[in-house]
Image (cartoon, rainbow, N blue to C red):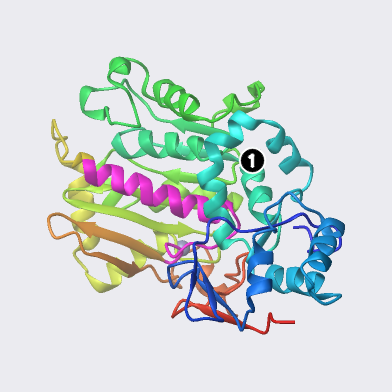
Amino acid sequence: MQQMDPQSMVPIVKPALRRGWRDRTTLQFGMTPAHAVTLGPMDPATASFLDLLNGTRGPALLREEGRRMDLPDGHVDALVERLARSGLVDDARAGGPAADALRAKKEVLDRLRPDLASLSLTASEPGEAIGLLAARRSLRVQVRGAGRVGGVLASLLSGAGVGEVDVRDVGRVEPGDVAPGGLPSESVGDRRDEAARRAARRSAPDRPPRRTSRTRLEGDDPGFSLVILTPRDDVDVHAPAPSAADPLIASGTPHLYAGVVEGTGVVGPFVLPGETGCAGCLHEARTERDQAWPRLVAQWRSGRQRPVRPCDLALATTVAGLAATHALAFLDGRVPSSAGARWEVSLPALHWHARPVWAHPACPCGAAEKGKGGMRLQGRGVARDNGGATTVEGVTP
Ligand SMILES: [Zn+2]
């Protein structure tokens, strides 16, 4: 991340935050408690000066405008620095070479502008948001399972700017796999993995660079930033087999589970191998709580395949969307709330709740051992006050 330098910035007050006067001297940026900030006391001259911070003027020009508006010497620089420190301004030119390359692709950036504006809400440093968006273009993510959830999820990640979304599955597309935003009806009968990759590519804002045969290798490619397991099989959603994730745990590959089982949508756990609870931890904890658990799982696995598994289309799409936001939060450098938890929602009342997935000492992943020394769950960002608008004092000359 680039360090803020008010002397070289081309500042823009984040357009993503709506402005409103709380009283005659206090200006609130943003509407929602999660991201709102208030500035005050603020005089009318400073307030109208904010309009000039729109990404078209560098420091010299801004100082000149400040003098014209009779603002005291040094006030402009102090104001910009203060705003930057409060996370209220972005830098229209910062973010590094990858960001510059993205800015040069106007059509691509136009597709992603709402995502960029959204990233600006959680980014703390000027230039950070476009830096993160540009960084997504070099990331590789694998989605395992291309049913209603996986197909939509792969397209969402691709559409959000993730450079390479690989999809793994077996068999051919069935009519019930078709979902808006996921596998199209024309793909029925095609190979599932190929159809889902095609759908993901079509959702991309940009044509990805051609990849070498490296990506065609079978097995667990340690080069993936994240693997998302979206099984079509409902038993695998409810009781993910620990052995399936062994190579991911061994290679230290972060992974996330998502799917629909009966009338319940599940997102999580998001697993940082050796740091947060994994499928093995989940299995151990369930066995401890309920001695019948392994017996039930064995019966579910060996039972006759039903011709049709229940999967509500809207619920599957909801799960895909929520899993994609958790995945993107991680790819953008944060630790999502699905780390150490499974978010679950059941038809028809649709109350969301998170069930904890504790690291278990009997699980070979080692997360429980690590947990004793304190978890390293640090994202890139800064903690924000979620209770109400954060207040920043003193912006009057
Ligand atoms: Zn574990």
Q: Is residue 126 visible?
A: yes
Q: Name the quadrant containing residue 326.
A: bottom left
The structure residue drawn at horizontal position 22% and vertical position 50%, both measured from the top left corner, is 298
Q: Name the quadrant containing residue 52.
A: bottom right
Q: Is residue 214 above or below residue 363?
A: above
Q: Quadrant of the C terminus?
A: bottom right
The residue range painted magenta reads: 314-340
Label count reads: 1
Q: Give the overall secondary structure of the magenta segment.
A: helix
The structure residue drawn at horizontal position 51% and vertical position 32%, both measured from the top left corner, is 166
Circle 1: element type: loop
Q: Which residue is mark 1?
A: 223
Image coordinates of residue 24 in percent, x first then y, are: 52, 81
Give the class, few, some or many, for how many residues have Cα within 10 Å of label 1's Cα (few <14, many ≥20). Answer: some
Closer-to-camera residue (31/357): 31
Closer-to-camera residue (211/248): 211
Q: Left or right of 256: which side holds 11?
A: right
Is residue 350 one of those drawn in magenta?
Answer: no
Dot 1 amino acid type: Gly
Image coordinates of residue 201 in percent, x first then y, are: 50, 25
Q: Is residue 239 above or below residue 102?
A: below
Image coordinates of residue 60 in percent, x first then y, are: 87, 58
Q: Quadrant of the N terminus?
A: bottom right
